Image (spheres, rainbow, N blue to C red):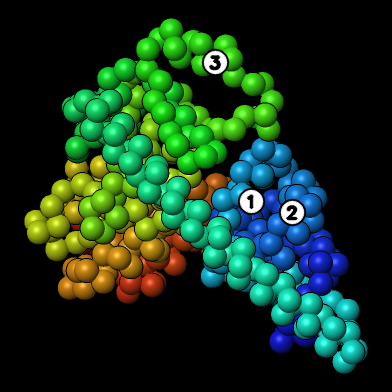
Amino acid sequence: MSRDYDPPSIESVEEALSFISADLAREEWVRVLMGVKSEFGDGAFSVCEDWSKKGSTFNKSNFKATWDNIDAAGSTTIKTVFKLAIDNGYEGKKLSDEERKSLALESQKRAKQREKEQATALAKKRKWHKVISKLATTLWNDYTIDIKSNQYLTQKKVSSHGLKAFRTSIVAVMHDNMTTEIIEQPEKIKAFFNNLPTVKEERAFSFLHIKRSELAIPLYDINKKLWQLQIINKTGTKLFLKHGRKSGCFFFIGKVSDSDVIATGEGYATCASVYAAMKWFCVIGFDAGNLNKVAQLFKEKYPDKKHIIINDNDCHENQSPENPKDNPGVFYGNQAANSVGGIAVTPQFEQMADVA
């Protein structure tokens, strides 16, 4: 295949994937799925699943959930996949003019079909976002209480800055027909699990079991609308309401008017530690892939502030911080810093003052 990228076939994609390791960092793995789905839609499900199975951490349920959540109308295209394959030695089959013309016509037909599918999927996605926003708002307002600390915050040695904890155990249910319910009485929760189909495919709903005292962190957009909740349980596992919006959403610590610096990081504990040490206005983006979007929102709204990205250092011995697989926290943090003309730092708190 030339660097101009000949029109792809499902066979050429399958061959290209054979040159790409399935043991990518999660963000890069998702980008590959996004690129393939943007061209072939759900018709490429089995090809991508077979490729993903070669990864050491493959999980069938996780793959399907990830695939279903991918927006085929996203900005990542099939060219991303072929570039990655070419960088790893893929050359592709040399096509005749007739083959190239035939594949181009097929690609055009798929593009028209994708436009229809994407419009339908986008409308469904936006409707789900509104449904989950309403559910998250109800949970935040009616089922949580203000706290100064809890088990997770104590373990991380950070304070609560506007966080809450659930006052009672509940099950949040998201039905496939885009309705929701909250189950809260112990006997009703017990009945729910007693009647729960053991085979996930037999369920016409998804659910999240939230237990009393688990931490709740709201996710807002730049206009301060609440869209989603992050729940952190007693083991430190971080959970979100299914179908909810996360992209471009954040939580914040401090007042932007009190700081010349806007510091954006992934997790609450890291940002709370930075705030305690530096008193910078801190923004939590919740994952590495969201840092760039959130940082750009604040750069646009506050162009005169100094923008610092707080990297999560995921690198271990013999791993490269320049490789997204080895160190997604630093890789995507650096990308976000570059996009807003800011500085990326990996916190060692006694040295933080040097970058202010």
Residue 341: x, y in percent? 32, 74
- Image point (57%, 50%), residue name: 69
User: Residue 72 versus residue 145: which sits nearer the camera?
Assistant: 72
In the rendered view, does 109 fall on the left or right side of 155? Answer: right
Give amino acid for label 3.
Answer: Phe
x then y, percent, for residue 252:
24, 49
Instruction: Locate residue 131 relative to residue 30 in the image: left or right.
Output: left
The kind of residue on which mark 2 rests is Phe
Q: Nearer the viewer, residue 188 or 340?
A: 188
Report if the CB atoms under discs 1 and 2 are less than 8 Å apart: yes
Which residue has dot 3 on it? 193
Disc 3 and disc 1: Cα gap in Å?
A: 27 Å
Amino acid found under the numbered disc labelled 1: Trp
Q: Secondary structure at mark 1?
A: helix
Left or right: 136 as drawn, with respect to 208? left
Q: Which residue is mark 2?
A: 45
Residue in the picture at 33% in, 41% down: 134
Determine crowd level at label 1: few under 14, some 14-19, many 20+ residues with C-alpha closer than 10 A: many
Mark 3 or mark 1: whose residue is earlier in sequence: 1
Q: In which quadrant is the C terminus drawn?
A: bottom left
